[in-house]
Amino acid sequence: MLARWGRSAHIVFISFCLLTNVIVHSMLTIGGAVSVNALTGVSVEGAAVVMPLMVTIYTVHGGLRATYLASYWHVMFIYVSTLVFAFQVYTKDSDLGSAWRMYEKLKVVGDKFPVEGNLGGSYLTVCTMPKPPTMARDSSEGLEGLMT
């Protein structure tokens, strides 16, 4: 960048790269912390500090290979857990039994207990009423995707 377009373009691109990294890492850290909070009740602030610290420790201790192996095993755990859970819910549970029965039950629940802000109060829609925090989050995610 510096050799081809000069110092000012180099500074602009470095600034965009730094801004992109800050946005992406903060979104990942906060998203993970909120997930840990929802699953375990740990404070969001505590989880936001501990998670990057743990990743830093095993990366420093095991190197880049440890990062790749940990990422691989985390993803495998998520996929296997999701598949086992979906199989159990849709085949073993007598209340649900199939994806179609789940769809029907979600329609009934949406009619009885509508979700405020969702289109028609449905649990099955991706159309929600615009709210400032949602708009800000979605805009920043779009900006992050654009700048990477």
Image (spheres, grey):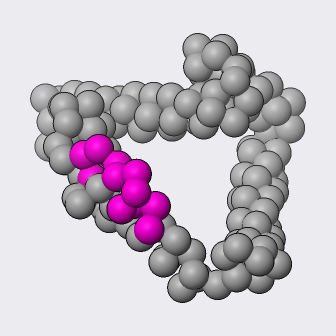
Q: Is residue 148 visible?
A: no
- Left or right of residue 9, residue 23 in this image: right
Task: Give the quarter of the image for residue 54.
Answer: top right
Q: Quadrant of residue 140?
A: top left
Position of residue 24 relative to residue 92, above or below, is: above
Would residue 72 appear left or right of 125 to someone viewing this image?
A: right
| Residue 101 screen position, x and y as percent | 57, 81
Which residue ends up furthest to the front in the rendered image?
A: 112
Residue that sits furthest to the right in the current view: 61
Any part of residue 107 in sight? yes
- Rendered residue at 52%/71% (across/down): 105
Between 131 and 54, the one lying in front of the other is 131
Q: Residue at x 54, y 85 (%)?
A: 100
Q: Residue at x 70, y 73 (%)?
A: 95
**Residue, x 59% and y 28% (percent of image)?**
33
Q: Is 3 a magenta residue? A: no
Tell me the quadrant of the picture where the N terminus can be found.
top left
Q: Position of residue 86 (x, y in %)?
A: 71, 72
The location of residue 102, given as percent across then percent down, is 56, 75
Task: Give residue 17's position: percent from left, percent from top.
Answer: 33, 36
User: Start and end of the magenta stretch?
Assistant: 108-118
Q: Please name whichever residue, 75 or 80, is drawn nearer the observer in this view of the structure.
A: 80
